[in-house]
Each structure stands twice: as structure tokens, then as C-alpha cells.
Amino acid sequence: MLDVCLLGTAGMMPLPYRYLTALMTRYNGSSLLIDCGEGTQMAIKKKGLSFKPIDVICFTHYHADHISGLPGLLLTMGNAERTEPLTMIGPKGLERVVSALRTIAPELPFDIKFIELAGAEQEIEINGYCIKAFKVNHNVTCYGYRIDIKRAGKFDVERAKANNIPMMYWNKLQKGETIEADGVTYTPDMVLGAARKGISLVYSTDTRPVKSLVEAAKDVDLLIAEGMYAEKEKLAKAKQYKHMTFYEAAKIASDANARELWLTHFSPSLVRGEDYMPAVKKIFENSHLGKDGKYVELKFEDEE
């Protein structure tokens, strides 16, 4: 099961009813944050979530509305007596940007590990998360993220017996360990059936519609994508500043055969976004307007 919470849905500037961009996921005791706009700490507290389990922070890009909440968050995590290392992932220049922001948060009781992205795609596995970063099209270098929680096949007793594997090793093999004993190597695939469908999530903001986003979101359980503008007459503005409209995001969800779409990263000028949803749903029926604190538990198929 993957917990998903859309902490902030505003683009450009925070509003009294809308925090800046941030998303938190939780899996197996580890929390992952994508972007950290101003107000992220307040959004986390308001939702009753914890700072300490945040092990990974991914950044789409370094515009202020996506990273300005980081110094305060780091200080709060330090004050929560965190000592475990924190991993940050983002476009090239990440360490330089974070070091500059840490001028006001110079002393922390934990180390920070930086993974700077290069190229069109990069895959990283950490704490059970399989993260795929993919480049999108904004006016600065920007990445979207796909998160997969993979699921091994079911334990197959008959297969284990056929391979003459001692019962004492079954449990460890089922958990993915490889065993070497008495000159023989036993691997998990010797006791497991075919891999089962896992859980998948794509998060992408600040981009024009691009093929890389459609490909990353292929058959995804949940696509969270920006809908900067809802008014159809603002398409030219979306193109100029390299953002997406509600309708373009819905088209991507449809083309990718996504299971569900949440819109986010709204322009400060957007009011009554729900008024535009009937037209959006004509393009992709299972579309929803994102709201601060919007939450879902994505479950494995046989848990639903």
C-alpha cells in the first residue's frame, strides 16, 4: 500500500486557501517528498503527518515555488532529532542550490546525500521506491517523476519442492534474499511465481505536453499533473510560459491510459476550478480537481 497526500496545489504564489507545490508519499515506514514550496511544513502539520520519516526529497526544478520551503523544513527535521541521512534528488546544480539555501540552516544533525540527474531519464531505487526521473519541457531544466512499488510473485510451494530447496530457506527466499549453502546457490525466482502488478504514481508539473510524460504515465494508477490554466483563452499563455491547461493534462491521461488524474499547480488567478471539470471529464472521465490535503491509499490489486 502506498499513501499519497497532495500537500500543496498552488503555482507561483501561496494563497490563504492553497499552499505551494508539494506531494508526500509513504511506504513501509519511509516518506518521500516531491517539491517543497512555501507552506509545506504547515501542510504536513495540518494533515497530521510526521517530518522525521522523510528519507527522500525529489525536486522537479529550482523555481522558488517548488523549493522555497526547504530551509525551514530541514531545521524542523533537525529539531525532531533526526540523525539518519537524507537523500535529495534533482536536476544538475542540486547541491549548489541547496547549499545556498542552507545559509540560514547551516547546522543539521544528519547528512544529506545528493543525486543530480543527468540525461533524459534516470532510474533510482531507494527504500522500496523505484523512482524514474524523466525530463519534461519547461523554461528551465525540469523533471517529472514516476514512482513504482514493485511486487514479487506469490510463493510457490510446489516450485520450491521441485527445486529441492530446504524448507529452512523458504522464508528468506520469499523475502528476496539469495542463499548460498553447501556449495549451492538458491535464488528467489526458484520459489516465486511471476511478478504481480505493483503500484504506480506519476507526478509532473511545469511542462508543456510532451511524449516523455505520456510514456512515463503509461497505465499508471495515478497521474498527478499540472493544470496551470482552466480558461481556454489562456492556452497561448500556457504555451508562452511552458505550462499545461486542464484539457492538455486530461489528454495526456487519456493517451497514457492512466487509471486516474489529479490536477494541481493552479494559477493564482484560478477560481472555481470545479466549474471547468465537466469539460475536462469529457476528455478523461476519471479526472479530479486537486486540493490541499487530498489523500488516497493506493493498494495492490488483491487488496482493493
Image (spheres, rainbow, N blue to C red):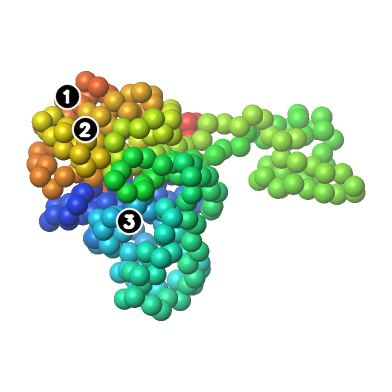
Specify the amino acid type for callout 3.
Tyr
Residue at x 48%, y 31% (from the top left corner): 301
Q: Secondary structure at mark 1?
A: helix
Q: Is residue 93 left or right of residue 21?
A: right
- Contact check, label 1 and label 2, Cβ < 8 Å: yes
Residue 253 quadrant: top left
Q: Secondary structure at mark 3?
A: loop
Specify the amino acid type for callout 1.
Ala
Q: Nearer the viewer, mark 1 or mark 3?
A: 3
Q: CA distance from mark 1 to mark 2?
A: 9 Å
Whole-percent x, y for residue 150 in the image: 54, 39
Q: CA distance from mark 1 to mark 3?
A: 32 Å
Q: Where residue 246 is drawn, which disc sits there?
A: 2
Residue at x 17%, y 32% (from the top left corner): 235
Of residue 48 and residue 217, the one placed in the foreground of this image is: 217
Q: Which residue is the extreme one toward the bottom? A: 107
Q: Earlier in the sequence, mark 1 or mark 3?
A: 3
Of residue 208 and residue 67, the one placed in the foreground of this image is: 208
Residue at x 13%, y 34% (from the top left corner): 234
Whole-percent x, y for residue 73 in the image: 33, 66
Whole-percent x, y for residue 175 in the image: 66, 45
Q: Can residue 260 be seen at all in this image of the molecule?
A: no
What residue is shown with label 3?
A: 62
Q: Where residue 279 is drawn, which disc sits there?
A: 1
Q: Secondary structure at mark 2?
A: helix
